[in-house]
Image: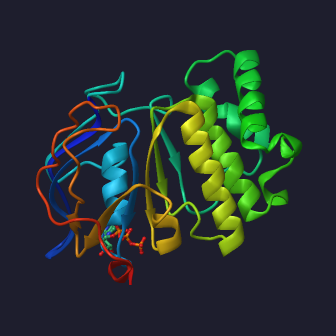
Amino acid sequence: MTALVSLEGIARTYRSGATAVVAVRPLTATVTAGDRIAITGPSGSGKSTLLHLMAGLERPSAGGVAWPGLRTAGRVPGPGEVGLVFQGPSLLPPLTAAENVALPLVIAGVALAAARARAEQAMVEVGVADIAGQLPEELSGGQAQRVAIARVVAARPRLVLADEPTGQLDHATGAHVLDVLLAAADAIDAAVVLTTHDPAVADRLTSRWTMRDGRCHLPDRPAEGRDGTDQGAVVGAGRTAASKEDLA
Ligand SMILES: Nc1ncnc2c1ncn2[C@@H]1O[C@H](COP(=O)(O)OP(=O)(O)OP(=O)(O)O)[C@@H](O)[C@H]1O
C-alpha cells in the first residue's frame, strides 16, 4: 500500500549558538491509508516535532520526508492533502466559525459560494452547524476544537495530523472531541496521526508510537494489512506496542 508519509532516516536537531537540542533521532517509518496512530511520550520527547516533520511544517536536519501517496508527492502538502488540528486556539478571532471553516478553501482557490457550501456541509457533518455564525471568543474550548475539525473535514484531506487535540479540554469534552475527530476521519477516509499524553486517548487509536528523548519506538506491524495487501514492515525501530507505563 502506498505510504501517505514516508520518513527516511529523518532527524531534527535545534541549534542555538553552541547549544544543540536533539528533538527527533533518526527514524524511518511510514503512515499509510487507514492508519490510526497515537504518538505518545513525556513532555519534550519530540512528539510535536515529529508531527511537524510529517506535516512539512519543519524541515528535517537529516534524512528525508516525502508524501508519495498524496497528490503533492514531492512538495509540502497543502490543506486539501493534510489537515492539521492543534492543541490551542487556532481559529481567526475576527471571523465567524463558518468563515474560519471556509477560509482555507478560499485561499486554495475554491470560489466563495462553493467554499461556503462546503463549509456548511462540513459543519453539519461535525455537528457544529448551530454555532456557524458565532465568533471564536463566543465558543467553548470543545466547540472551537470541533470547528477546527470541521475546517479539516471541509478540505477532505487524506491525512489528519492532530497535535494534542484534547490537551486543553476536560476529560469528558476531550473524549467527545476525539469521537468527533475519529468519526470525521472515518467519514472522509483519512488516516489519523495524533500526539497525546493521555493514555485514554492513545487507547482509542489502533497503533502507538512511543517517544523518549527523541527516539521513537514503533510497534511491529503485521505483514498482512486489513485488506489483505502487504503493507511491508516498518524499518528502523523497536518493540511492540508500548505499555501505559511508557506514557508517564
Ligand atoms: N523551535 C525550537 N527551538 C529549539 N528547541 C526546540 C524547538 N521546538 C522544540 N524544541 C525542543 O525539542 C525538544 C522536543 O520538543 P517537542 O515540542 O517536539 O516535544 P513534545 O514531546 O511535543 O513536548 P510536549 O508534550 O511538552 O509538547 C524539546 O527539548 C524542546 O525544548
The image shows residue 81 at horizontal and vertical percentages of 44, 30
Q: Is residue 18 visible?
A: yes
Counting from the top left corner in percent of width and height, residue 147 is at: 71, 47
Residue ID at (23%, 76%): 213
Q: How many marks?
A: 0
**Image quadrant where residue 242 sits:** bottom left
Which of the 4 quarters of the picture holds residue 120?
A: top right
Residue in view at x 45 percent, y 73 percent: 197
**Vertical position of residue 84 compared to residue 123: above or below:** below
Q: Quadrant of the N terminus?
A: top left
Q: Reply above or below: 101 against 22.
A: above
Is residue 110 shown left or right of residue 8?
A: right
Quarter for ligand 1? bottom left
Image spot of residue 214 (x, y percent):
22, 69
Q: From the viewer's perspective, is 144 left or right of 37?
A: right
Check the picture and name the quadrant holding the C terminus.
bottom left
Left/right of residue 82 with respect to residue 246 in the rendered view: right
Nearer-the-camera pick, 20 or 179: 179
The residue drawn where x is 45% and y is 57% is 205
Instruction: Indicate how the structure is coloured in the image.
Output: rainbow
Residue 69 location in percent, x, y? 31, 27
Residue in the foreground of this view, choosing between 124 and 139: 124
Q: Residue at x 30, y 29 (%)?
A: 75
Please give left or right for residue 65 compared with residue 37 in the image.
left
Q: Quadrant of residue 243?
A: bottom left
> In this rendering, does residue 14 appear at all?
no
